[in-house]
Image (cartoon, rainbow, N blue to C red):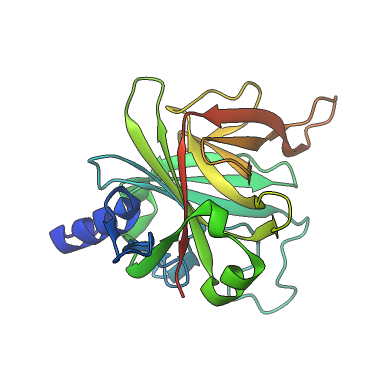
C-alpha cells in the first residue's frame, strides 16, 4: 500500500483545515482563504486485482490537528465491472464509500447487501485521498442575495463544531441548494448533503453508523446551529433505510465560501 506523503499530508491539512485560517481583504469584510476544490477532489486506488479507480469526494470531516481526515464519496449504483452483458447488478443496489488514509467502509442499500469496513491494505495495493485547495472568499450570510449568488457560484460550507469531548472538527461540503429572500431579513436556507457527521460530535439514536460516522442531509438557516436528517432503518418492520432520523448540532460556527 502507498502511504500518504508529507506533501500530501500538508495538502490535506491545508484543504480540510483551511476555513480555520482566514485573512481579511481591505475594508470589504470579505475573508480570503483556501478551501477544498470539490470539483477536483477525489479518492484514487489500485485493487490487488490490478483495477484502477477514482471516486469524487462529496464531503469531508477533519479533526483539528490531524491530517487523517474522513471523506465521503457519493452513492452510485453497483455494476458488473468490464462486463460483456447487462452492466447494472441484478438485483440492483446502491453503494458509497467512507474512507480515511488507512481504512474504508462501504455502505450498501438494496438486495440485502451488508455494510462492510476494512483496512485499505486488505483490498488495495494503493489508496490515496486527493483534496486540492482552491482560493475562496468568505461571504457574510447577510450578503447572500440573488445577485451575490449569481456572481459567486459555486459555493461550499464549512462548519466548525466541538465534539462531545471538546475537540474541534471541521466539516466541509459543497452547496447543492440554497434559497434566499432579500425583503424580509435577508433570509437564507441551505439544504445539502449527504455529508458525514463523526460520532465523536454526537450520537444519533437508531441511525446507521458507518466508518465512525453518520450519513446525513443538512439544513442550515442560522450561523450557530444546523438540523440533520440521518440515514438509518425506518421505524417499521421492514429493513429499508432512509434519511429519517432527526438530530441537531448547536454551538457551531458556519461559513459560506465562494469558489468563483
Residue 4 makes an appearance in the image: no
In this picture, residue 52 sits left or right of residue 153: left
In the picture as drawn, the residue positioned furthest to the left comes out as 6
In this picture, residue 31 sits left or right of residue 205: left
The residue closer to the viewer here, 6 or 160, is: 160
**What's the residue at 50%, 25% (across, down)?**
202
> In the rendered image, which quarter contains the N terminus?
bottom left
In this picture, residue 89 sits left or right of residue 192: right
**What's the residue at 17%, 60% (across, down)?**
5
In this picture, residue 54 sits left or right of residue 6: right
Report x, y in % for residue 95: 62, 53
In the picture as drawn, the residue positioned furthest to the right comes out as 237
**What's the residue at 57%, 69% (across, down)?**
148
Up the image or down, 244 lies above or below 140; here it is above
The residue closer to the viewer here, 174 or 50, is: 174
Up the image or down, 201 lies above or below 25; here it is above
Report x, y in % for residue 181: 72, 57
Amino acid at each position: 500500500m502507498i502511504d500518504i506523503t508529507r506533501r500530501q499530508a500538508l495538502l490535506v491539512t491545508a484543504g480540510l483545515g483551511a476555513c480555520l485560517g482566514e485573512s481579511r481583504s481591505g475594508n470589504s469584510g470579505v475573508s480570503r482563504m483556501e478551501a477544498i476544490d470539490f470539483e477536483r477532489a477525489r479518492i484514487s486506488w489500485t485493487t490487488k486485482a490490478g483495477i484502477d479507480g477514482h471516486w469524487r469526494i462529496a464531503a469531508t470531516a477533519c479533526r483539528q490537528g490531524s491530517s487523517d481526515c474522513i471523506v465521503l464519496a457519493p452513492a452510485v449504483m453497483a455494476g458488473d465491472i468490464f462486463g460483456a452483458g447487462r452492466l447494472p447488478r441484478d438485483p440492483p443496489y446502491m453503494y458509497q464509500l467512507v474512507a480515511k488514509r488507512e481504512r474504508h467502509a462501504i455502505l450498501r442499500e438494496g438486495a440485502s447487501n451488508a455494510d462492510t469496513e476494512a483496512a485499505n491494505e486488505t483490498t488495495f495495493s494503493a489508496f490515496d485521498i486527493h483534496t486540492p485547495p482552491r482560493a475562496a472568499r468568505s461571504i457574510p450570510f447577510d450578503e447572500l442575495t440573488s445577485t451575490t449568488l449569481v456572481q459567486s457560484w459555486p459555493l461550499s460550507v464549512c462548519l466548525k463544531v466541538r465534539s462531545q469531548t471538546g475537540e474541534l472538527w471541521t466539516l466541509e461540503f459543497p452547496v447543492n441548494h440554497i434559497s434566499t429572500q432579500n425583503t424580509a431579513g435577508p433570509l437564507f436556507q441551505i439544504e445539502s448533503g449527504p455529508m458525514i457527521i463523526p460520532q465523536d460530535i454526537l450520537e444519533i439514536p437508531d441511525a446507521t453508523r458507518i466508518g465512525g460516522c453518520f450519513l446525513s442531509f443538512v439544513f442550515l438557516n442560522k450561523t450557530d446551529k444546523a438540523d440533520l436528517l440521518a440515514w438509518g432503518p425506518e421505524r417499521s418492520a421492514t429493513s429499508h433505510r432512509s434519511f429519517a432520523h432527526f438530530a441537531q448540532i448547536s454551538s457551531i460556527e458556519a461559513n459560506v465560501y465562494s469558489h468563483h
